Amino acid sequence: MKKWVVVLFVTSLFGWAVYDLTEPEEETGDKEGEEAQMVAEGPATNDPETGLDQGQQAPDFSLERLNGEETKLSDLRGKKVMLNFWATWCPPCRAEMPDMEKFYQNEDVEILAVNLTGTESSVGDVEEFAEEFGLSFQILKDTNSEVSTIYEVNPVPTSVFIDEEGRIQSVMLGAMNYDMMLQRLEEL
């Protein structure tokens, strides 16, 4: 079990490093690449297509919360959303939870924490985790990995930042701290 956790942790760190190395290129932008992309995609419209790329409409879904109520992503239009995919067995997920709670309490953002429930020993583990960390944001159960598959989640944690119009603005692979969350929120 310890080897599995170490392998998962190293894989998560590697994913984070790869993302971190590629992120500055995306932020600074490549003028020629952007022009070529605009030609390929055609002119911008007010109704972006659904997809996982920046500026595309986030795929809608409905999942059950720990308290039994349903949450639908599209019901949160008009609000900034941090969609976070996580699991209780994931050390980086544990590390970012206190900052996520602080972020939720201090900022004007909705957090949908999608637990990969199908990978958990039991739903009870998720409930205990939420209680241990005093989490007050919505925790959703992805029991059949349907939503994590739609969002092509790998590794965990993965966070998707969605603007008020329901469009994806950025995706972060790996654990985040409070300052990183604030930076992403400012970009929405």
Image: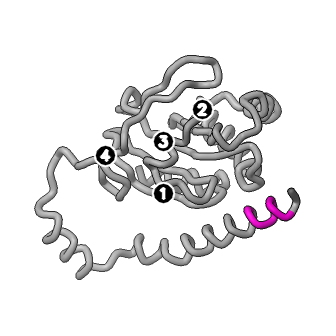
Q: Residues in magenta?
A: 3-8
**Would residue 88 be counted in the magenta stretch?**
no
Point out the tag, 1 or 3, that comes first from the N-terminus.
3
Point out the tag, 1 or 4, that comes first from the N-terminus.
4
- Residue sitting at x 22%, y 48%: 48
Q: Is residue 82 visible?
A: no
Q: Foreground residue, 3 or 50?
A: 3
**Would residue 7 be counted in the magenta stretch?**
yes
- Which numbered circle lies on residue 57? 4
Q: Foreground residue, 32 or 129?
A: 129
Q: Is residue 53 visible?
A: yes
Q: Which residue is mark 2?
A: 141
Q: Looking at the picture, which amino acid does disc 4 mark?
A: Gln
Point out the tag, 4 or 2, that comes first from the N-terminus.
4
Q: CA distance from mark 2 to mark 3?
A: 10 Å
Q: Which residue is mark 1?
A: 171
Crowdedness near tag 1: few (<14), some (14–19) or many (≥20) residues, C-alpha within 10 Å: some
